[in-house]
Amino acid sequence: MASSQATVARAPALAGARRRRRKHGGLTPWLFALPALAVYTVFLVYPAFTSLYFSLTDWDGLSPNYHVVGLDNYRAMVSDPVVVRAAINNVIWTVVTIVVPVILGLTLALLLNGKARGKPILRMLFYTPGVLPLVSIASIWGWLYNPNYGAVNALLRDIGLDSLAQPWLGQNSTALAAVMVPAIWLRTGFPMLLYLAALQGIPHEQYEAATVDGATRSQRFWHITMPNLKPAHYIVIALSLIDSFKVFDLIYATTYGGPGTTTQVMGTWMYFNVFQYYHAGYGTAIAVVITIVAIAVSIPYVLSQTKEHDR
Amino acid sequence: MTSLNAASVPQPVAALPDATVATQDRLPPVRRKKGGIGTTVVLAIGALIWISPLVLLILTSVRPLSDFVATGPLAWPKQFTWANFSDAWRIGRFATTYRNSTILLIMKVPIGLLLSAMLAFALSKLRMRFRRTIMFGVFLGLTIPIYITIVPVFIMLRSFGITDSLLGLVGPYLAFGIPFEVLVLQSFFRQLPDELIEAAKIDGAGEWRIFFTLILPLSTPALATVAILDAVATWNEFLFALIVLNSDVNKTIPVGLLNFQGQFANNNTGLAAGILIAVVPILLAYVILQRWIVGGLTAGATKG
């Protein structure tokens, strides 16, 4: 029993050194923790901090020489119209791809929690887009949106709305909205699952008691269902928020940031700067900004998870 | 009749025992009443519309291009053919990308699972200093966008000489998989009774033996769920693969699909077949393993 940890109370008479070791568990926990922590540090923590340093340089990503230019890259971002466009797009993207999937997901969950039949298969169908590779989702929707042979325009023509048929991904006015549709498609399933799990956890006695007291259907919804869903709202919104900052694949594979720079987001603009225009310093500065925003908004969630699991 | 229906109540969180607790205080079977036809119809129509892009994809992939061009994308096929699949398979180099994605999966998923389980065990069942700090640091990884690391990781891989190699993807994939895996696994381990571990210790078992012969076997459901979700994420990952892999012989399915999409822009039926080839393994895995996938997603989010 060299490195036991949970027996402190049973052996109060041990020597001080031994007791300290018991309290902190000694070396063994670290041997368990080390491999994962090492990989995590080498491939995530260390690169993230290195990016922080690169963002202060004028490095092009190729040559061995570069200069530290301080905050120049960050200053340049303010006057870069594409960064402004990308930041606005990120905000629009975040709001739309959270609000719409959450409302749709909650609606589906409420319906699925009712008296419908074949629920497992219905639930499975609604979640299906969520498991597909984002690139394949981009391919599918690029194909549906095809101006000449796409199903979307064909459908509009079939129902007599020829005038609405248009190159959805190829024009400034509709491109961003058109890319958000597949995002909504793939992201509605997740809130649905979480809300469904939460709804099934609401004790039925609450509804019974309310019914006995003569509460109407909408009263039961607003005074029992919604308050019980509060933790689910929190998790759904926190996770969606985290996810929406990472948007890259869908935009890259559908519009490539275009037409022009209409659908650039911070992630794609970072990529273009680093790998197309060889502005590695500037590109990493963009990545740093979005990472800081992402961390800042999700710290409450991470803290709550840490506390919840460390009781 | 009414109580029979209850058997079809979905069990989204049944895969992990901690979550099963929540399913048990669901409505008892007696509460189910007749009806629900209206809701069922509404949901069924909704579901049909929801998956209509996939249905259309399947229908398009089995018709000749001439038929597609002649009658349009929404018409029911007049002729059927498998030729699109063989064309797409060959031109899209799917034999290569399938092989690469599979190799990557086999290299990455078991290692990631073992490393994460070890860390999760230390965090949940062993007494260690800075535990809370480590948890916070690891969970923070959930929020970090991959692209903050790509430039330094790319340089690192270049100095190891493993750019344009599947091996180069293993490290970054492991690092980005660890936070979620640890979150789910430690939450599961925490619910295994301490008495079991105490009893094993009294029998003289050390931590390693306890971990491998007690904790891991008892956690098979959680490990399976995490492995499946991790396999899906690995199979689907795009950004690192795009940056690290250059030659066609090394590309994984998502990157290969993107190239293929460009080449087949004017061959709608071939494109549909290629997209299907790329997603069929994921769709099959999802249909077969959906109980575990759904359970893991909900448990990962509600419990951690």
Image: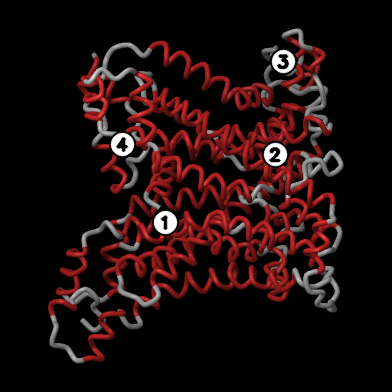
Which residue appears at 42% of the width and 49% of the height?
B300
Give the mark nearer the N terminus: 3 vs 4.
3
Camera-near label (2 vs 3) is 3
Relative depth, front residue between B241 and A81? A81
Closest to the camera, between mark 3 and mark 1, is 1
Q: Is residue A14 left or right of residue A135?
A: left
For discs 1 and 4, the disc positioned in front in the rendered view: 1
**In front of the other: B108 or A86:** A86
Give the spatial CA distance, label 1 vs label 4: 21 Å
Q: Amino acid at mark 1?
A: Ser
- Measured Cα–Cα span from mark 3 to mark 1: 47 Å
Q: Is residue B106 visible?
A: no
Q: CA distance from mark 4 to mark 2?
A: 46 Å
Query: Foreground: B257 or A263?
Result: A263
Report which quarter residue A73 is drawn in. bottom right
Q: Quadrant of the C terminus of chain A?
A: bottom left
Q: What is the secondary structure assignment of the residue under circle 4?
A: loop
Q: Label 3 lies in what chain?
A: A
Q: Amino acid at mark 2?
A: Trp
Q: Tell me the residue that label 2 is attached to.
A: B89
The chain carrying label 4 is: A
Q: Chain of mark 2?
A: B
* Residue named by callout 3: A155
Mark 1 and mark 2: span between their CA atoms?
47 Å
Q: Position of residue B38 (x, y in %)?
A: 42, 11
The reply, left or right, for residue B69 in relation to residue A4 is: right
Q: Any mark on residue A201, and which?
A: 4
